[in-house]
Amino acid sequence: MKQYFKIMLMALGTGCLAYSCGKLDLNKPLSTSHGTPGVVTNVKVKNDSAKAILTYSLPQVQDIAYVKAVYSLASGTTREVKASVYDNQLTLDGFGDTLEHVVKLYVVNKAEVASEPVTVTVKPLENPIWGVFRAMKVLPDFNGIRITSKNPSRYNLAIEVLKDSMGQWFPVDGIYTATDSISSPIRGLDTMPKKLAVFIRDRFMNHTDTLFTTLKPFYETAIAKNTHREFTLPGDSPSAWASNKVSNLWDGYTELWPYVNITKDEGKPSVITFDLGVSAQLSRIVIWDYPEYLNSGRAYYYGGNPRKFEVWASPNPPLDGSWNNWTLMATCEEVKPSGLPYGQLTSEDRNLGFAGFNWDLRADVSKMRYIRIKVNQNWAGSYYMALAEVQLYGDPR
């Protein structure tokens, strides 16, 4: 019996060894080498912002796998970029300067044998982070700061902010964006003067100079809801059910039926109006959409949830329902993070909807007291609105 177990163990070991060798074989080149491949010819260089685009002609051989470019960035990092044999173009990215860079081009065959290098020189144009840096403004804002700039090429970048604390610099937050018009707040700062350092970088860790500034954030607090009241004007949209009313928007319930406000769909943009009860320098509004039930769950970006809408404010509106003496505070559009089709949501979509949507309001206007929300399109493609709760922020002092 012992001899039998020894034979079995030897057989298993031999099988495992063979299997292991078989797995290692999978990592071998796709074919045996047919010798060193020829080189690329007719190389042309087009220098562009933070990159260079190379075009070339391939050698007339059958076993080419790809073309590889090897070059160094300003940081000293060596970067490799590859292009398929079915293409004749390489985009070399990651440059942070406008100096000349030597690039070596290799043709690699299916046996992973590389050709002799062909050397070309590129001279990339200015990295877009510098244009964004020159256009950047760092301004005081409610409960923090606001950074504005222009990014016409929609370059993917990060704006890093650091705060001085007893001579040491500590990161506050970052803004990560590829939008063409930047206007982003960084909140959570008190109203004491802050020494800040701000710079811009890209994903290759190229960075601009640093802007140093001292700012004093504006005071901001949640506007108390106990003074809010309905203020229905001519032309405002009626509620769809008696239990749904505008005053439900400040009762503290962010998802429970019937403590919501759902308007009738009258075939035109729906409008509601309410009175804060106090005048305040407004900074932002948080809106909780009503999540209807869908497939045993709750659905945001759905039904009467506002997709494209406007927030208006007035210190003293006319009683005829007209838009005289009303100021447009924000033009808003909800964007589903997942990008999934209507009625399909990820956990990220639900979490953002559950937390409420923050919308910045204009800070360059006087104190306001009355709020109007006008829905131009909901997620169902019609006009009615389905909201659960609102919260205004600002300075009511």
Image: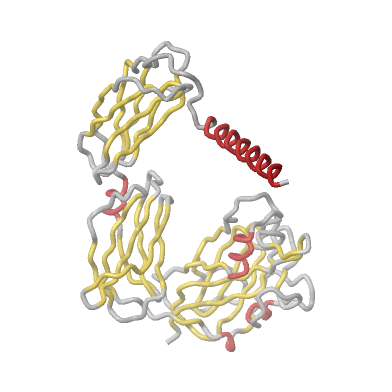
> In screen coordinates, is 214 left or right of 179?
left
Q: Position of residue 262 (x, y in %)?
A: 72, 70
185 versus 279 height, above or below: above
Look at the image and tell me whether residue 235 can be seen: no
Q: Image quadrant of residue 213?
A: bottom left
Taking depth in this image into account, of 201 and 224 the one nearest to the observer is 201
Q: Residue at x 52, y 61 (%)?
A: 331
Q: Image quadrant of residue 300?
A: bottom right
> In screen coordinates, is 374 left or right of 344?
left
Q: Quadrant of the C terminus?
A: bottom left
186 versus 247 height, above or below: above
Q: Position of residue 115 (x, y in %)?
A: 34, 20
Residue occupying the far top of the picture: 60
Taking depth in this image into account, of 9 and 305 the one nearest to the observer is 9
Q: Residue at x 60, y 53 (%)?
A: 338
Taking depth in this image into account, of 9 and 149 the one nearest to the observer is 9
Q: Position of residue 109 (x, y in %)?
A: 43, 21
Q: Image quadrant of residue 215?
A: bottom left
Q: Residue at x 51, y 86 (%)?
A: 278
Q: Residue at x 39, y 22 (%)?
A: 113
Here the colouring is secondary structure
Report how many numbered discs are placed on residues in the image: 0
125 versus 255 height, above or below: above
Q: Position of residue 362 (x, y in %)?
A: 44, 68
